[in-house]
Image (cartoon, rainbow, N blue to C red):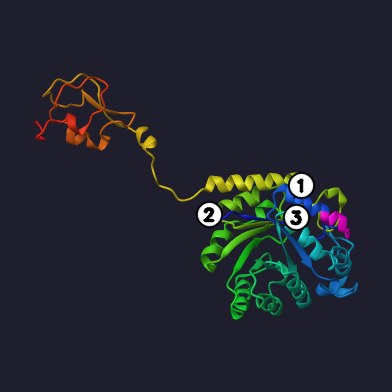
Amino acid sequence: MKKKVLIVAELSANHNRNYDLAAKTIEAMARAGADAVKLQTFRPESLTLELDQGPFAPKTSGLWKGYTPWQLYQQAAMPYEWQPRLKELAESLGMILFSTPFDLEAVDFLEHMNVPMYKIAAMEINDIPLIEYAASKGRPMVFSTGVAALDDIEAALAACHRQNNEDITLLKCTSQYPAKVEQANLLTIPDMQQRFGLKVGLSDHSPGWMVPVVATSLGACMIEKHFILDRSLGGPDAAFSMEPQEFAEMVQAVRKAELALGEVDYSLSDADRLRRRSLFVVKDIAPGEIFTKENIRSVRPGHGLPPAEIHRVLGSRAADFLPQGKALQEDDIAKPFEKIG
């Protein structure tokens, strides 16, 4: 049986530095049908420097206009002490919880939490020391590839292989916030599957659930979307996060897509066979009368000899009286079989 797509709700910065809000959001994730919760484990110094000039100057456009990188990550960072409690909460609700570490200290912290896997963020795809350290723990590795060229992916995979870690999932990702549907390039998913021989999923920042459903149809094994209780709460990730009802609709759509995909199946039931054509007597046929195109014909349903047999039957004789509407059977043909003319 095909394994179900793992649907991951990304909490990211949507806790707004409020533990109760984080807990309520995780409870809503469970009600919406998420299989897993993903956190991000970092402190501002994991990602940037506390400066406000040059590359560290405030953003001049986009969702985070006016923020320095330090200010942005300071607002987005989840306190470490919350994370073990949130993991217990998620697991009590039937979900797994894992996280994205952004430095070696975060990996050590998550090891103590016994998370089931590690996610490497798109912008960390070239941090080979971080990847090697996380991979060395022997847990499954998940990579977003939003800012990765082929050689970056190959280098990240090689880092895992050096640590004898082969349980790897790649996520097709468009690292724009929000991303446009036409930027998804989902045909990359089957290409990645063939090229790398790995599990491939989707990390999506586009509005709605169309992109995840199409990704599912292309074989995605994991779907990750940002989740927020209410976009009116604001915060760095609010604009490209799904509210509970939207997320629930996506889950239902993905599950329906899985049902539609089914499995490779060329089997045919007896009932299906009966729905097809077969040879029938269309005019009463006397014993010994020759079968012709005027007295037998291929029509529905499939109770008689298959239509391909008509060329064998034409010109032979009837073994007995055959009334109009009778499905022609092998025993209706006189033996020995001898064509006339």
Is residue 15 toward the left or the right of residue 336 in the image? right
**Mark identifier at residue 2:** 2
Which image quarter holds the C terminus? top left
> Can you tell which of label 1 and label 3 is closer to the viewer?
1
Total residue callouts = 3
User: Counting other residues with Cα less than 10 Å from the Cα at mark 3, is it few (<14), some (14-19), or many (20 or more)?
Assistant: some
Nearest the eye: 316 or 32: 32
Residue pointed to by mark 3: 178
Residue 11 coordinates in the image, percent (x, y)? 78, 58
Q: Quadrant of residue 138?
A: bottom right
Residue pointed to by mark 1: 244
Q: Mark 1 or mark 3: which comes first in sequence?
A: 3
Examine the rendering and report whether any part of residue 166 can be seen: yes
Q: Secondary structure at mark 2?
A: loop
User: Counting other residues with Cα less than 10 Å from the Cα at mark 1, is it few (<14), some (14-19), or many (20 or more)?
Assistant: many
Q: CA distance from mark 3 to mark 2?
A: 31 Å
**Mark identifier at residue 133:** none
Q: Vertically, is 43 above or below 289? A: below
Examine the rendering and report whether any part of residue 247 can be seen: no
The amino acid at mark 2 is Lys
